[in-house]
Amino acid sequence: MKSFASYLRVFVLVAIAVAGTEYLMETEPGQWAVLEYPFAGVFIGIVLIFAIAVEASIASLRNVLYQSLSDEGKERYHASEQAKVSKLEEKWDSLMQSMTKSKEIEEEHEIILDHDYDGIKELDNRLPPWWLYSFYATIIFGVIYLVRFHVVGDYTQAEEYEREVAMAQEEIEAYLATAEDIINVDNVSFLEDSSDLKKGEKIYTANCVACHRADGGGGIGPNLTDEYWILGGGIKNVFKTISEGGRPGKGMVAWKSDLSAKEMQQVASYVLTLQENDPADGKAPEGDVWEEEE
Ligand code: HEC
């Protein structure tokens, strides 16, 4: 397995296998199934080893056949291989020639212009067809563009912008509707569902009772059952306090690195249900009365 062609075949086969795997297996955008799922990686590995094995067997088979040839046969074999290569080269040259229409160096004297600046001369080469046709294409494009947008007025850049923004907005909404953890201060809402409130209670019991007490009456932290709030009441403020923490040095840390957005929403909702409690020995109110603005 030494020729360039066999490396190319192995590469193409593995590339097809990778592309097929990525296409068939659904992953998050930006993730590679081959890296995410071990068996996909193993599959690609098997394809690679298989391809190398096939190439190696073909190569050794060829070698055996080659060795079995007589000297004359070997020569004929080389000649035919050589012919294949020169045919490819010829094709390539004629393609280049048709795209550039350039003169060979030996023929340049036919197109040299007769001015001469200190030995610098000018060749009157033909415009290369690839360049010329691209130039014509830009002219056609320009005419169509001019008529479409400046004469007929199909749509303006502003309209195009609006349309794309609206499309992106739709995509964002569709994404937010399915993604649970994309909850932030701006879109957080109170969860009425009892299963969410149960989870919120669990999180509260595990993390918050030490300072706020199980009934919310307060201790190190303020009373959560009264209508007075230091940092603002309502789901948005409470979520923000839990996520970002209280004022520096007061003891209320930011929970966003320990709890997911969903969990913070659940515990924030639970905290608001503590308003129903009225512990006799609760901590004295701190802060201001919070009124929900409509
Ligand atoms: C180490 C003690 C401590 C723990 C644990 C703690 N807090 Fe606090 N919490 C405080 C203190 C102290 C404040 C007052 C912060 C301030 O004054 O800025 C506070 C304030 C708050 C407030 C705002 C109250 C107001 O009046 O504005 C909320 C809501 C809150 N905590 C919820 C929680 C939740 C939910 C948890 C558990 C995830 C929690 N806290 C865990 C000590 C704690």
Image (cartoon, rainbow, N blue to C red):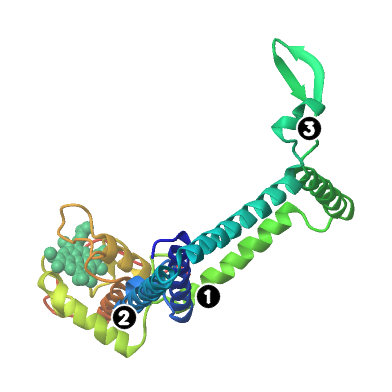
Image point (23%, 61%), residue name: 254
- Choose the circle earlier in sequence order: 2 or 1: 2
Callout 1 amino acid: Ala
Tell me how far mark 1 sits from mark 3, CA to CA: 58 Å
- Choose the circle earlier in sequence order: 3 or 2: 2
Q: Specify the quadrant of the image occupied by residue 159.
A: bottom right
Task: Assign a secondary structure to mark 1.
Answer: helix
**Which labelled disc corresponds to residue 125?**
3
Per the image, the residue denoted by label 2 is 39
Q: Position of residue 65 (x, y in %)?
A: 43, 73
Q: Position of residue 147 (x, y in %)?
A: 88, 52
Q: Is residue 221 visible?
A: no
Q: Badge 2: how crowded within 10 Å, few (<14), some, or many (20+)? A: few
Per the image, the residue denoted by label 1 is 174
In the displayed image of the protein, which residue is found farthest to the top?
118
Q: Is residue 81 visible?
A: yes
Q: On the picture, is 59 further left or further right than 160? A: left
Tell me how far mark 2 sits from mark 1, CA to CA: 32 Å
Callout 2 amino acid: Phe
Callout 3 amino acid: Asn
Image point (89%, 51%), residue name: 151
